[in-house]
């Protein structure tokens, strides 16, 4: 965040939240400037969902300060929620109702004035490309359409801040693309977006800024490109082969101070652009690829991101 | 792109807009499912009325000077209210909280826990007031003479249903699993029903049981219904209304307290 950036839409200071002995969120500091999209990247259990729930007052921090759209939360959580749209990870549509009714009910809950309600519902349905299914029962929709309906519902009041909790988890790659188009549209409309994800590609594609979370804290923050360059360099050299071959590669490069990462049947040597040519020749044929956020994540936490 | 004006002033504990939002969701859903809900809530008490009214009615012609079919017809009003409120409060609340995650969605909108459950209980109470009239109409077919006091029945049903809806909500927050409701039904709902004077007067029981019945909200409902139909007893009836009101308030406080613990980490 540069000094000239606008007032933060979200600001968390030293936030702690424990469940029994488990510190789900452990001294979290986070600012999200208005009109930007921040990705919370981390494995299951990193504290992403708990953080999201604290922003809506559905979890109360043990200590620390939270400001959402200028409102201290949980004290003025309701005022903040009136200007937020929340897309939950777990679907909770009313299956018995039609697509239109689902959004219309949320328009009432989100206090869209009565005379504007029909128009707001239609606009949300059009944005989510569900207008032609408006009279279908929600139960009859496909998985991707259901997710789009969840998003339409959260956008019906024209929120200033949208929280997306793992918006594409469990969806086909093609359907995932449809959701990305929707999120992109929000960004271009100037809406602030906070999105938790454990899909690297999603964070790289959609987020202006990424905060890498591990054990309830932010351990790195920056644009996806800057994070990659800073922590994982330019490129990685990837080797495939039987386990003993991979072991030889690891031994050869860790001896001279390079880091590696295993993914299934391959091993990647990170910051490979700095490998001496002699070592590259010794290692034999590896495939060069651009470094990515996954590399960053593994380097920073020692954990794998995707299951 | 904001459509709504964010309310900047300190918001009250229960806002009508939040209440209306939850209430609207319930009425919208009801338009989809009213047939099955209404069928169960009307047919079951009607069967009870006919079975007891004519089954026992063949053995017992009058109770406390009232023809038995009329006695049981007015009593079954209370059981209809009980069933359509306590079970809706228990099962619907549990399913929406635990399985459907509906409340996680609603509480992410500008609705707080007290507004949510007050609105849901109100809707259950409205339905109870309406469903409570069904046995009365059936009893009228079988000879119960109409009276002006009958116009009070929906209100008695509403007040009683309010308390039992809250009681159901409260239980939904304290049971370890949905299977535990069978204990509630056997150990609480059935005794409440039998110790209320729906089917038979309590005068045959020992005095201490009759005293105990004073603690049974359904007993007060039954008495109010009979007095509304056969003639008000002003002093007693004020007491019955007070008892039902206290019951509703206490249950409401317990329900909100327990469900807040369930839903807010």
Image (cartoon, coloured by chain):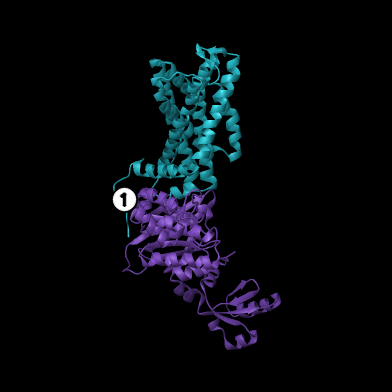
The answer to which quarter of the image holds residue B184 is top right
Q: Is residue B239 left or right of residue A215?
A: left
Read off the residue under disc 1. A115
| Residue at left offset 52%, top offset 65% | A175
The colour one sees for chain A in the rendered image is purple
Secondary structure of the residue carrying numbered label 1: helix
The chain holding disc 1 is A
Residue B98, image x, y percentages: 54, 45
| Residue at left offset 43%, top offset 61% | A128
Let me know if residue A59 appears in the view.
Answer: no
Let me know if residue A241 appears in the view.
Answer: yes
How many residues crowd around disc 1 within 10 Å: few (fewer than 14), some, or many (20 or more)? few
Rendered position, A184 above or below A60: below
Q: Is residue B143 left or right of residue A191?
A: right
Residue A184, image x, y percentages: 42, 67
Residue B175, image x, y percentages: 56, 38
The residue closer to the viewer here, A97 or A216, is A97
| Residue at left offset 53%, top offset 18% | B69
Quarter containing the N terminus of chain B: bottom left
């Amino acid at each position: 965040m540069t000094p000239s950036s606008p007032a933060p839409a979200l600001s968390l200071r030293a936030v702690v939240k424990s469940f029994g002995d488990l510190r789900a969120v452990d001294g979290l500091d986070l600012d999200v400037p208005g009109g930007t999209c921040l990705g919370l990247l981390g494995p299951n259990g990193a504290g992403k969902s708990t953080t999201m729930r604290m922003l809506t007052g559905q979890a109360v921090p043990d200590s620390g300060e939270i400001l959402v759209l200028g409102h201290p939360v949980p004290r003025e959580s309701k005022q903040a929620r009136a200007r937020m749209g929340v897309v939950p990870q777990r679907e909770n549509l009313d299956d018995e109702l039609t697509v239109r009714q689902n959004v219309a009910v949320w328009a009432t809950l989100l206090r869209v004035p009565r005379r504007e309600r029909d128009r707001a519902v239609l606009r949300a349905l059009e944005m989510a490309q569900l207008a032609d299914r408006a009279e279908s029962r929600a139960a009859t929709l496909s998985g991707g359409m259901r997710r789009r309906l969840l998003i339409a519902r959260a956008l019906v009041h024209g929120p200033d801040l949208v929280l997306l909790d793992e918006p594409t988890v469990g969806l086909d790659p093609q359907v995932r693309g449809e959701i990305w188009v929707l999120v992109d549209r929000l960004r271009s409309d100037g809406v602030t977006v906070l999105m938790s994800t454990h899909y690297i590609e999603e964070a790289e594609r959609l987020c202006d800024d990424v905060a890498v979370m591990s054990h309830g804290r932010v351990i790195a923050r920056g644009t996806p490109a800057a994070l990659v360059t800073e922590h994982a360099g330019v490129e990685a050299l990837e080797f495939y082969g039987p386990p003993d071959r991979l072991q030889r590669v690891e031994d050869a490069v860790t001896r001279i101070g390079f880091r590696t990462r295993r993914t299934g049947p391959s091993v990647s040597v990170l910051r490979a652009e700095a490998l001496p040519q002699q070592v590259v020749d010794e290692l034999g044929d590896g495939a060069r690829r651009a470094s990515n956020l996954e590399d960053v994540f593994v380097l920073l936490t020692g954990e794998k991101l995707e299951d | 792109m904001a459509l709504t004006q964010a309310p900047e002033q300190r918001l009250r504990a229960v806002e009508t807009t939040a209440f209306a939002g939850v209430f609207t969701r319930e009425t919208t859903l009801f338009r989809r499912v009213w047939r099955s809900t209404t069928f169960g809530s009307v047919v079951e008490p009607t069967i009870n009325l006919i079975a007891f009214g004519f089954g026992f009615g063949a053995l017992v012609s009058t109770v406390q000077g009232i023809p038995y079919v009329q006695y049981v017809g007015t009593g079954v009003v209370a059981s209809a209210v009980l069933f359509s409120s306590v079970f809706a409060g228990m099962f619907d609340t549990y399913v929406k909280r635990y399985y459907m995650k509906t409340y996680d969605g609603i509480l992410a909108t500008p609705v707080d826990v007290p507004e949510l459950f007050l609105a849901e209980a109100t809707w259950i109470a409205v339905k109870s007031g309406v469903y409570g009239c069904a046995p009365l109409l059936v009893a009228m077919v079988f000879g119960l003479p109409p009276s002006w006091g009958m116009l009070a029945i929906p209100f008695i049903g509403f007040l009683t249903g309010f308390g039992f809806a809250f009681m159901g909500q409260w239980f939904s927050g304290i049971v370890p699993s949905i299977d535990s409701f069978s204990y509630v039904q056997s150990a609480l709902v059935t005794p409440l029903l039998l110790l209320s004077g729906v089917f038979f007067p309590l005068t045959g029981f020992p005095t201490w049981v009759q005293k105990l019945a004073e603690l049974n909200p359904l007993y007060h409902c039954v008495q109010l219904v009979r007095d509304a139909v056969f003639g008000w007893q002003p002093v007693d009836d004020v007491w019955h209304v007070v008892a039902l009101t206290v019951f509703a308030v206490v249950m409401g406080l317990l329900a909100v307290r327990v469900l807040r613990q369930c839903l807010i980490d």
